[in-house]
Structure formats: C-alpha cells, structure tokens
Amino acid sequence: MPDETPTPLRLGTSRASLVARFRVSDGALLTATHQRGHRRVREPRYYSARAGRTAVRLKGRLRAGHYRLILSAVDGALNRSARAVRFHVSG
C-alpha cells in the first residue's frame, strides 16, 4: 500500500499570485482553501494533479495579514489527506 501522506507544502510568491509546491503519491483531485482566522476568504478552488511533484498557482491578491492555506487531496480510491500552511502577506 503506497504512502498517502503528502510532503510538506512549500510556498512561493509573486506580485499577484501564490504558488504551492508539493508531491502526491497518486493522481488526485485537490481542493485549495484560503482562511484568515476561522473565516474562509475565497471559495475553494479545485485542481487535478498527477502523481509526483506538483505546483498549483493560486491567483488573486490578498490583503495584508496572516492567512492559512489548506490543501486537501482525494485520490481515485477516495483516500483523503490534507496539509495546512500559514503565511503572512505584508502591506
């Protein structure tokens, strides 16, 4: 049985987007959610990912403050996994 635990999330930024880099063991449907405190900032965004290293660009500007990005994956066998990373946007 393959390891379903994803690797830690790594974030990169540009002026108007956030890039999340990670690795998944199987192809999966990804859900990305931004939170500020306990509030969801945006509607969830959905992506499909192949097995291996993957990068997802999350477009749109965020106001200055502390955020959390929750990235969850569901593979074809309906195994679920999730990772969260906190980040700060400076004004």
Image (tube, helix red, strand yellow):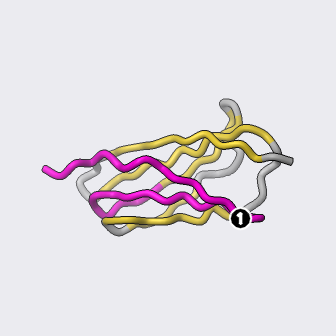
Residue 63 place in picture, x, y as percent: 82, 48
Q: Amino acid at mark 1?
A: Ser
Label 1 sits on residue: 14
Between 48 and 25, which is closer to the camera in this rendering? 25
Q: Residue at x 49, y 65 (%)?
A: 55
Q: Is residue 60 above or below residue 65?
A: below
Q: Residue at x 82, y 45 (%)?
A: 64
Query: Is 47 positioned to the left or the right of 41 in the image?
Result: left
Q: Residue at x 37, y 58 (%)?
A: 23
Q: Is residue 32 above or below residue 58?
A: above
State which region is magenta. 1-30
Q: Residue at x 35, y 69 (%)?
A: 50
Query: Is 4 positioned to the left or the right of 16 in the image?
Result: left
Query: Is 14 positioned to the left or the right of 33 in the image?
Result: right
Whether the magenta-drawn stretch holds residue 91 is answered as no
Residue 37 place in picture, x, y as percent: 69, 31
Examine the image and state in which quarter residue 45 appears: bottom right
Whether the magenta-drawn stretch holds residue 26 is answered as yes
